[in-house]
Amino acid sequence: MTTYSIGIFSMALKFGSIMTLFESTFSMAWNQYLFRIVTEEKQKIMVVHMLEVVVPIIFMIALSIGLFSHEIIYYFADPKYIESSKYIACISFSISLLSVSTVMQTGPKVLSKTQYLSYSFFISCVTNLILLFLLTKEYQLLGVVWAMIIANSILVISSWYFSNKIYPIRFKLPLLLIEYVFGIMICSYLCFDDRELVCRIILEIVMIAFYLFLLWRAVNRYRRSC
């Protein structure tokens, strides 16, 4: 990659990493919440419903950052970096997946079998390195950001797998998959240059309506489970 490409990626990473603030805050809050309910009879059910509540919120935030990244770069940075806007959605969405993996890691945390967390992170890191090597040469920056998404998706899957082995929780995986695929579709759309503001506003409205509906259902379920 050229120096210009590195500059573009650095700018995209800077704004995409806004999600890191939400992710780190959620992780701290989640650990406190988890150990507060660890003795509850319905603990597993509460974890399932909390995931249903959390996912729409973090995906809405991540995708909203991406949908208006063009304006964010234009007004808060330098217009010469406007190309970086098409990578921000992928970066912020990949970071949002870390919050999903945090919930999926409930089993090892509750049972204090943290070696399984290491296995998940190792698999994710190896996947990321391999994909960076394979995709960057062919697809440049697109290869980098999609490697991040795939690697963090693998982290979610491996976290669920190891947690399910030692502490089975019946997460609603089909629902999570639908939410995930919807987010991936938006990220894919935003990777193109011809993204009119009107189209993005319409997509933002559709996206918010979709996730708010799922959030409303999830909150009602959570209230009934408590």
Image (cartoon, rainbow, N blue to C red):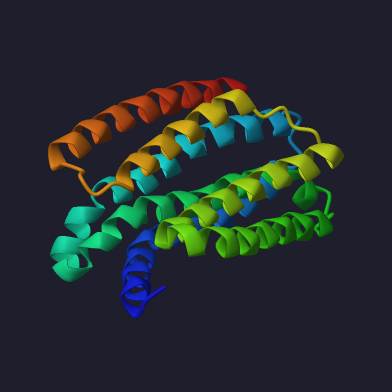
Q: Nearer the viewer, residue 170 or 188?
A: 188
Question: Residue 188's x, y, as percent?
Answer: 38, 42
Q: Split into 4 quadrants, where in the image is the N terminus? A: bottom left
The answer to which image quadrant residue 20 occupies is bottom left
Question: Residue 124's x, y, as percent?
Answer: 67, 56
Q: Split into 4 quadrants, where in the image is the C terminus? A: top right
Look at 29% across and 62% down and name the residue there.
Answer: 84
In this rendering, the count of numbered labels is 0
Question: Residue 178's x, y, as percent?
Answer: 51, 27
Q: Is residue 146 above or below residue 122?
A: above
Look at 18% across and 66% down and name the residue there.
Answer: 76
The answer to which image quadrant residue 126 occupies is bottom right
Q: Nearer the viewer, residue 168 or 2?
A: 2
Q: Is residue 98 above or below residue 224?
A: below
Look at 33% across and 40% down and name the residue there.
Answer: 189
Look at 73% across and 56% down and name the residue there.
Answer: 123
